[in-house]
């Protein structure tokens, strides 16, 4: 089982949440400012839904295998508040933000060797 946390359930994060939740081997949690009861994705292959657990404050979080950040670039410090409680010894961080400075932006908050910059094409 892969444990995955997504920080930022907007358009990109919400799409990723629903897609990841469709894989039975994934356990997905969402880190957001407010609880979201359900995510709905209307894709070419049909409507998909997901109702993952939602954390609304960092103390609720627990370590996961992957953290995926889908916030705006200027929200990096706010997203970073979630990293410590979500991070275990092998946790990797996938940054899905605009720009090309993903590693530099998150290096103050997370080990550089475990940061994966991501290109999103949705």
Image (spheres, rainbow, N blue to C red):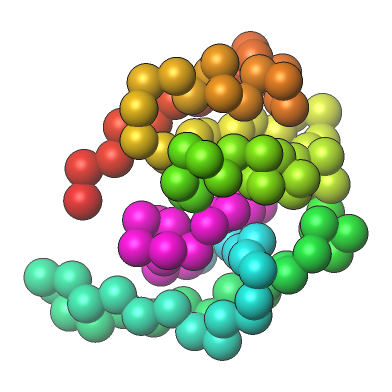
Residue 47 pos. (x, y %):
24, 82
Q: Nearer the viewer, residue 38 or 77?
A: 77
Instruction: Say which residue appears at 64% left-offset and 76% top-offset.
Output: 34
Left or right: 60, with 117 as reference point: right
Vertical arrangement, residue 96 with respect to residue 51, above or below: above
Please name the residue shown 56% across and 87% down the image: 37
Instruction: Give the farthest residue toward the left.
Output: 44
Q: Position of residue 106 (x, y in %)?
A: 62, 26
- The one of 55 and 72 positioned closer to us in this rendering: 72
Asked if one can make out residue 69 in the rendered structure from this viewpoint, the answer is no
16 is higher (above) or lower (below) than 73: below
Residue sitting at 56 percent across and 81 percent down? 36
Instruction: Provide the residue span drawn in magenta.
Output: 1-22
x and y percentages locating residue 59 in the rendered image: 89, 59
Report if residue 8 lies within the magenta region.
Answer: yes
| Callout count | 0
Rendered position, 74 above or below 58: above
Q: Residue furthest bottom?
A: 37
| Residue 32 quadrant | bottom right
Q: Residue at x 49, y 84 (%)?
A: 38
> Quadrant of the rendered structure where residue 22 is?
bottom left
Q: Position of residue 108 (x, y in %)?
A: 72, 20
104 on left or right of 15 = right
């Amino acid at each position: 089982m892969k444990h995955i946390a997504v920080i930022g359930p907007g358009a990109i994060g919400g799409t990723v949440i629903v897609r990841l939740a469709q894989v039975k081997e994934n356990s997905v949690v969402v880190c957001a400012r407010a609880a979201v009861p359900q995510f709905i994705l209307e894709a070419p292959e049909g409507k998909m839904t997901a109702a993952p657990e939602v954390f609304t404050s960092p103390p609720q979080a627990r370590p996961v295998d992957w953290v995926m950040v889908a916030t705006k670039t200027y929200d990096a410090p706010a997203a970073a508040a979630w990293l410590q409680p979500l991070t275990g010894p092998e946790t990797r961080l996938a940054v899905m933000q605009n720009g090309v400075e993903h590693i530099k932006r998150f290096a103050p908050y997370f080990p550089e060797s475990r940061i994966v910059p991501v290109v999103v094409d949705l």
